Image (cartoon, rainbow, N blue to C red):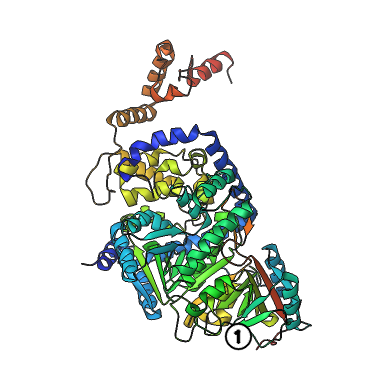
């Protein structure tokens, strides 16, 4: 008998009585108007920056950020709408398979710009679902991650997001929840940012429907 | 990475003694445990809320375990449908063979690892090295202890026993071109640089799994650093390894368990990253591994599953809160145990992984104070299980199938006789009074040396008169 049969056989031999599961208690809802504030508070508490561009042009904000943070090489996810960033910044698209781009992405890029699929207000998390238009590594490898978020795409929490987004039937290959920049407290419980992923996370909140 | 298994039981007492007499180690653990306890407490300000959440977590884990064989089959079917290849391993050796086989097939000479206690459990790094394949730990804490040639001393914070000065010296000595610095930020940036080169060039990334979802065929990982994402995103091949107990049925079961996990472990409402993997790169996608493998490991878990009481051991979600709150762990640290999983949870898991012959002294290293059970986010009755394990370890081996491997190996006839005598005395009042009459009258004959007890304590001497006698005397002189 192979390992699989052996293991399953031993488990079945125990004849565990199948238990039923009591109804799970849903988390407290965050009413729609409060979600932006809640998300902002949570992200900022985790050392993320949030810029409200609901009444402005996110493109100008990206340009200003590049100047302020000294970003000279910016790489955009395929799903980022076209945007003219200032002349001092070299802008390119993530448009090739990672194999052809890896060295450049690790060594030759200052910041990555992505669009979040949605966000969770209660826990303060961005949600990015991998797809041909949403590479997994763009929110991870460049030292600065700038993320555009449609203000109309903020769910109360994971449970409501699971229902609303109907991922259950067809999950993306990689669903990533991000609450802040990469960090560690592995040396003497001292918090340090930029362990392996981005050292900075900047979320630009755009008007509902403006990115689609 | 762990100590040789053959002398675990023998070595425990002396390792524990060594640890309690090391002031630096005591200070590191005391400080770290106080820090982690306070962080956890701040996440559960209200006891009633904690108990509500814990009831859910416990119910989900017990429900999942009660249907474990079906859920594993469902998980396998859905992972396979998603393009993730599933491998089953009955023991550590089979798991090592599977992983080495995958690495050799890919002609890889390097495997970069995210944090995985199961990979420690199967001593994967040694086996890979023996096969000529370098295994590099990429969790900062794991990287530090690997550089030092030590096993982790805590399941969540592997380098918790080290001061930043020790780490500064270690980096300066072991990493070419690095000068001494005890700035934590600089130390982390040094580690970041070394490891990013490895993430970029390795063909294989390895990770653990925090929870696997049967219904969707999804592997969930929590982390703060991003190394877990690196290992599962950048290399061509991602190999995940997990124990068979980590499966739940539905996506909606994940959130309560993960919030209990991160709050209990590091006092965080959420971690920086929550990573759900449901398949390799699909056609049209620009990145992600081309192959994803999952190794499902038994290694003694089916033995724990066989007994209804011991089955609760498998509810564990590996948060480490029981260690952080354990008065024994805080004083002796993680290495003294000699097992992959230290602390209270280690004491109840290890007998199933290794047998009682090697672990019978570990189950005695508890005051049964109950702090571990009080903070356990999934309601594992750790002290009850310890008592159950002690009975098996110290009772006579019966050879019954319900007994663990090595049952009876802690058996001491004299101790059993003493406890039997004690039980007789306490069950028979007249016998007890007779005994205490003699014990109080003959107290002058009490030996000054009382074995291990008097090594560090004053000898036990019976009182002049028993409480019974004193009360009787008082009632006679001043009737109530």
Identified at 29% across, 36% down, the residue is B411
Q: Could you tell me residue B392's position as x and y percent?
A: 31, 43
Q: Chain of mark 1?
A: A
- For residue B295, side relative to residue B469 (left or right): left
Identified at 47% across, 50% down, the residue is B147
Question: Relative to B77, does residue A46 appear above or below in the rendering?
Answer: above
B471 or B131, nearer to the observer: B131
Question: Relative to B388, does residue B233 appear above or below in the rendering?
Answer: below
Quadrant location, the N terminus of chain A: bottom left
Q: Could you tell me residue B462's position as x and y percent?
A: 45, 18
Q: Could you tell me residue B320's position as x and y percent?
A: 50, 52
- For residue B65, side relative to residue B167 (left or right): left
Q: Could you tell me residue B86's position as x and y percent?
A: 34, 71
Q: Which residue is mark 1?
A: A79
Q: Is residue B374 visible?
A: no
- For residue B16, side relative to residue A106 (left or right): left
Extreme residue toward the front, this view = B177
B474 or B348, nearer to the observer: B348
Give the tally of numbered discs: 1
- For residue A47, side relative to residue B294 (left or right): right
Identified at 33% across, 52% down, the residue is B353
Residue A120 lies in what quarter of the image? bottom right
Q: Residues within 10 Å of mark 1 (few under 14, many from 20)?
A: some
A150 or B98, nearer to the observer: B98
Residue B185 lies in what quarter of the image? bottom right
Secondary structure category for the residue under label 1? loop
Q: Is residue A12 visible?
A: yes
Question: Relative to B334, does residue A36 appear above or below in the rendering?
Answer: below
């Amino acid at each position: 008998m192979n390992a699989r049969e052996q293991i399953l056989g031993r488990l079945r031999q125990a004849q565990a009585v199948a238990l039923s599961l009591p109804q799970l208690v849903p988390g407290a809802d965050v009413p729609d108007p409060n979600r932006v504030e809640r998300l902002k508070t949570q992200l900022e508490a985790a050392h993320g920056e949030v810029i409200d561009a609901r009444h402005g042009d996110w493109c100008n904000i990206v340009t200003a950020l590049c100047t302020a943070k000294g970003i000279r090489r910016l790489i955009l996810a395929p799903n980022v709408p076209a945007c003219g960033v200032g002349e001092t910044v070299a802008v390119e698209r993530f448009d090739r398979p990672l194999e052809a781009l890896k060295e450049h992405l690790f060594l030759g890029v200052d910041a990555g710009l992505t669009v979040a699929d949605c966000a969770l207000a209660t826990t303060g998390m961005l949600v990015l679902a991998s797809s041909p238009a949403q590479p997994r590594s763009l929110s991870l490898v460049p030292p600065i991650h700038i993320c555009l978020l449609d203000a109309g795409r903020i769910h109360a929490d994971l449970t409501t997001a699971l229902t609303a987004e109907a991922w259950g039937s067809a999950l993306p290959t990689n669903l990533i929840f991000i609450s802040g920049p990469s960090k560690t407290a592995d040396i003497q419980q001292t918090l340090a940012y930029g362990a392996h992923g981005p050292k900075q996370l900047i979320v630009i909140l755009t008007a509902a429907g403006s990115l689609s | 990475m762990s100590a040789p298994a053959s002398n675990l039981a023998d070595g425990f007492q002396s390792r524990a003694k060594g640890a309690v007499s090391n002031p630096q180690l005591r200070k590191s653990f005391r400080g770290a445990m106080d820090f982690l306890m306070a962080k956890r407490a701040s996440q559960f300000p209200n006891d009633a809320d904690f108990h509500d959440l814990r009831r859910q977590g416990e119910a989900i884990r017990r429900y999942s375990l009660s249907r474990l064989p079906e859920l594993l089959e469902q998980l396998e079917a859905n992972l396979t449908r998603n393009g993730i290849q599933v491998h089953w391993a009955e023991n550590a050796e089979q798991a090592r063979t599977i992983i080495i086989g995958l690495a050799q097939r890919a002609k890889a000479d390097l495997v970069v690892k995210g944090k995985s206690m199961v990979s420690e459990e199967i001593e994967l790094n040694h086996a890979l090295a023996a096969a000529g394949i370098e295994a590099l730990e990429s969790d900062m804490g794991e990287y530090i202890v690997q550089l030092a040639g030590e096993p982790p001393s805590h399941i969540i914070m592997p380098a918790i026993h080290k001061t930043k000065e020790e780490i500064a010296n270690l980096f300066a000595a072991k990493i070419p071109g690095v000068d001494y610095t005890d700035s934590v930020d600089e130390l982390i940036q040094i580690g970041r640089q070394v490891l990013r080169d490895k993430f970029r060039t390795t063909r294989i990334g390895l990770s653990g799994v925090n929870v696997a979802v049967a219904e969707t065929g999804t592997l969930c990982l929590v982390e703060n650093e991003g190394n877990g994402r690196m290992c599962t995103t950048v290399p061509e091949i991602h190999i995940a390894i997990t124990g068979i107990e980590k499966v739940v049925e539905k996506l909606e079961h994940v959130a309560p368990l993960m919030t209990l996990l991160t709050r209990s472990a590091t006092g965080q409402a959420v971690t920086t990253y929550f990573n759900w993997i449901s398949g390799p790169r699909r056609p049209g996608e620009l990145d992600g591994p081309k192959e994803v493998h999952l190794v499902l490991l038994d290694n003694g878990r089916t033995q724990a599953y066989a007994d209804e009481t011991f089955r609760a051991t498998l509810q564990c979600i590996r948060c480490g809160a029981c260690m952080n709150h354990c008065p024994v762990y805080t004083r002796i640290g993680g290495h003294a145990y000699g097992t992959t999983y230290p602390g209270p949870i280690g004491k109840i898991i290890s007998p199933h992984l290794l047998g009682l012959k090697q672990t019978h002294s570990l189950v005695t290293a508890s005051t049964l104070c109950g702090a571990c059970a009080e903070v356990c986010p999934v309601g594992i009755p750790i002290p009850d299980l310890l008592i159950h394990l002690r009975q098996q370890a110290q009772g006579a081996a019966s050879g019954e199938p319900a007994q663990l491997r090595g049952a009876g190996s802690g058996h001491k006839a004299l101790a059993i006789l003493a406890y039997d005598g004690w039980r007789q005395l306490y069950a028979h009042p007249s016998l007890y009074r007779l005994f205490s009459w003699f014990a109080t009258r003959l107290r002058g004959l009490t030996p000054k040396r009382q074995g291990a007890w008097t090594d560090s304590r004053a000898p036990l001497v019976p009182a002049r008169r028993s409480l019974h006698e004193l009360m009787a005397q008082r009632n006679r002189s001043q009737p109530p």
